[in-house]
Image (spheres, helix red, strand yellow):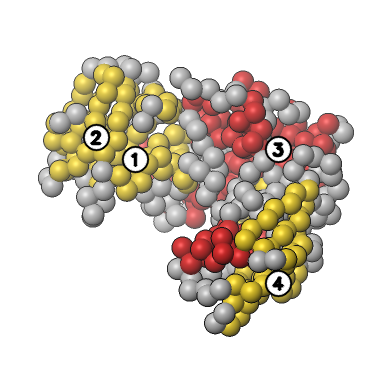
Amino acid sequence: MKKFGLKRIAAFAAVGIMALSLPANANAPIRTSIILPPAMNQHPVMRVAILQNVDKARLEFSSPYTVKHPITGDLLAQGLPQKEIIVNTSEDGILLDGRLIRTPHFTVITEDEMVQIEGRTYRAALRVQKNEKGKLLLVNEIAIDEYLKGVLPGEVDPRWHMEALKAQAVAARTFALFQALKNPEAPFFLTNDVKSQVYTGKNSEHIRTSEAVDATRGQVLTYRGMLFTGYFHSSCGGRTTSADAVWHAIPIVPLSGVTCGFCAGNKYDSWKSEFTFEEIRKKLNDRGYKFGTIKRIDELDHDRSGRIKRVAIHHSAGTRNMPASDFRLFIGADKMRSTLAKFQNSGGKLLITGKGWGHGVGMCQWGSKTMAERSFQYDNILRFYYPGSQISQAYSSPIEKPSGNWFSRSIDTIKGWFGA
Ligand SMILES: [Zn+2]
């Protein structure tokens, strides 16, 4: 039972959602809002990918378990508690502890409503799916509020003021529900890493962040009746920016950027980093580019918040421009912490000085911490960072016991909201 120390938690708190950039040449703008259906009377179920494209995985069940068909709910197998169960594939189906289950996917439900995947404990149900290449996808199917309890401690420090934790709960719920509504039939809505929200399962839950989830049950952010992507990031460096300045996204008022001023002076407020041109060339070429010897790298233009929009890379075979948010991800988003930065070329190196950490869109987590300490309530914090937004009740129903056909039922539920 590994538990993260508070230091580790604080490091996570610095990250926020980072890696939501698009491939450099994608043409269609990213959708930023979707109609929120009338309040639903079932607690939404999330699908979170825990392992993707693996040949096998090690599971552990500490109570009796049943294996069910994810669409019909039919019983396929059952077993007693077991320390090590290997799941792998065969031509005819999936092998669970050497037993052949003749379906391309199944759901495991345990009596204590917990499953262990590669030594980490997750609540609710596990769905195993074999893809056309014979590789396995392992998905945690879990009530959205239980999922959020496993997310929040990875995104903020549980010792923060309760109003900041509640603001984070609503933003994270909004983000997760948006992903589910966007593509209800997808095998999973979210990954367990910074590509969506860091999710480490049951062991990282903390009583205070869980309290923040319970205190805001069903609450999401909307703008004119539309649920929008509740982006957030660690620290904005003074001013947040618009989603369309960072990604090729459809502009929307709540994601248009605000002057923050609340995050000044936190430990992630300003930073410096240094890369050799050769190191940058290698990192970019690892992503499929073909850069020759790099001669200099310039800031090409900036958005209204002062963030670099595009960079110009001068190399031995010419000059190439690329979005600064992609450049940051490719060279290392932990080292080039934001695009609110200044470049200096010197002696075959790029020296970068910058402010803030993260993409800068939506709520600034360190700013929300200060606002909470200055007696702002969570709804005011959210309205400040997402201007024009309001809090809507998406559901009020309690968390349900995991069921064998959650997968098909949640598809039906979501389609039902849209009258499909
Ligand atoms: Zn800020």
* Circle 2 crowding by C-alpha within 10 Å: few under 14, some 14–19, many from 20: many
- Indicate which disc, 4 or 1, sits on the residue closer to the N terminus: 1
Above or below: residue 403 compared with residue 312:
above
Above or below: residue 326 compared with residue 379:
below
The amino acid type, in three-letter code, at marker 4 is Asp
Q: Cβ–Cβ below 8 Å for labels 3 and 2?
A: no
Residue, disc 3: 167
Which marked residue is nearer to the observer: mark 1 or mark 3? 1
Q: Find residue 138 and name its label.
A: 1
Above or below: residue 9 compared with residue 412:
above
The amino acid type, in three-letter code, at marker 2 is Val
Q: Would residue 283 be visible to someone looking at this image?
A: yes
* Circle 1 crowding by C-alpha within 10 Å: few under 14, some 14–19, many from 20: many
- Indicate which disc, 3 or 2, sits on the residue closer to the N terminus: 2
- Indicate which disc, 1 or 2, sits on the residue closer to the N terminus: 2
Q: Is residue 229 left or right of residue 85?
A: right
Q: Cβ–Cβ below 8 Å for labels 1 and 2?
A: yes
* Circle 4 crowding by C-alpha within 10 Å: few under 14, some 14–19, many from 20: some
Residue, disc 2: 87
Which residue occupies the foreground of this view, 386 or 25? 25
Give the CA separation, mark 4 to mark 1.
Answer: 43 Å
Q: Is residue 193 left or right of residue 305?
A: left
* Circle 3 crowding by C-alpha within 10 Å: few under 14, some 14–19, many from 20: many
